Every structure is written in C-alpha cells, then in structure tokens.
Image (tube, helix red, strand yellow):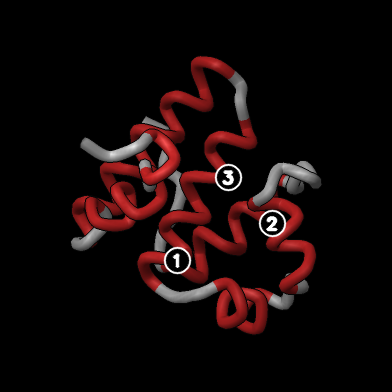
Amino acid sequence: MKNIKDFDLSGMIADELKTEEDIKEWLSLNLDEYLQDGNLNAFVRSLEYVVRAKDNISNISRKTGISRSNLYAIFNGEVTPQFDTVLKVLKELGYTLKVA
C-alpha cells in the first residue's frame, strides 16, 4: 500500500486529461463548481492542469504576454487573476466561455 506522502493528485489529474473532450469536461465541471462556490483559486488551479496537459507555462506566458512569474503566482494562489487574464489563457489554449 502506498504511503499518503506518495499520493500524487497532480499526476492522477494529468493522466485523466488526455483528449480534448476530457479537457473540456474538466474545465466545464470546474467552472460550474466555481459558479456554485465562488472559489476562483480552485478554478484557476484546474486551468493550470490544462496548461500543463496541453503546453507549458513558459510557452503560455510568451503567447499571452503574461509574465511567467505572474502565471506561477496566479496558479499558486498568491495572486488573484483579473478576468481578462483567465480569458487570455483560455483563448490561447483554444477555448472560450459560453453562457448557456
């Protein structure tokens, strides 16, 4: 049996984000959860998993014009991102927000 210290939640999530459908479902579920509980940091953290599954933080930084240090601070919950920052990252990953 594995020790709790060996539990790798990030690895488990990354293993589940293999296809576009997986990623879209993941983002949709996390966005719905954010709309219910207001925990923006949790949604942003879910977005970080997508960044890492599709690309990397350095490339997203370069493509969006958002500094790498700012992205790390956002993903670590040290800074609350502005809405347009979240939209820039989503757009660069090829996603949009849709109101249903």
In the rendered image, the vertical position of residue 10 relative to residue 20, given as above or below: above
Residue in the picture at 50% in, 16% down: 36
Q: Are marks 2 and 1 in contact (CB under 8 Å)?
A: no
Q: Amino acid at mark 3?
A: Val
Q: Amino acid at mark 1?
A: Arg
Within 10 angstroms of label 3, few (less than 14), some, or many (20 or more) residues? many
Determine the secondary structure under disc 2.
Answer: helix
Q: Which comes before the other along the chain, label 2 or label 1?
A: 1
Asked whether the beta carbons under mark 1 and mark 3 sit within 8 Å of each other, the answer is no
* Residue to which mark 2 is pinned: 85
Q: Quadrant of the C terminus?
A: top left
Residue toward you, 58 or 89: 58
Q: Which residue is mark 1?
A: 52
Which residue shows up at 42% across the image and 27% down it?
32
On the picture, is 80 further left or further right than 44? right
Residue 91 at x, y percent in the picture: 51, 64
Residue 96 on image: x %, y %: 44, 54
Q: Which mark is residue 44?
A: 3
- Determine the secondary structure under disc 3: helix
Between discs 1 and 3, the one toward the N terminus: 3
Image disc number at residue 9: none
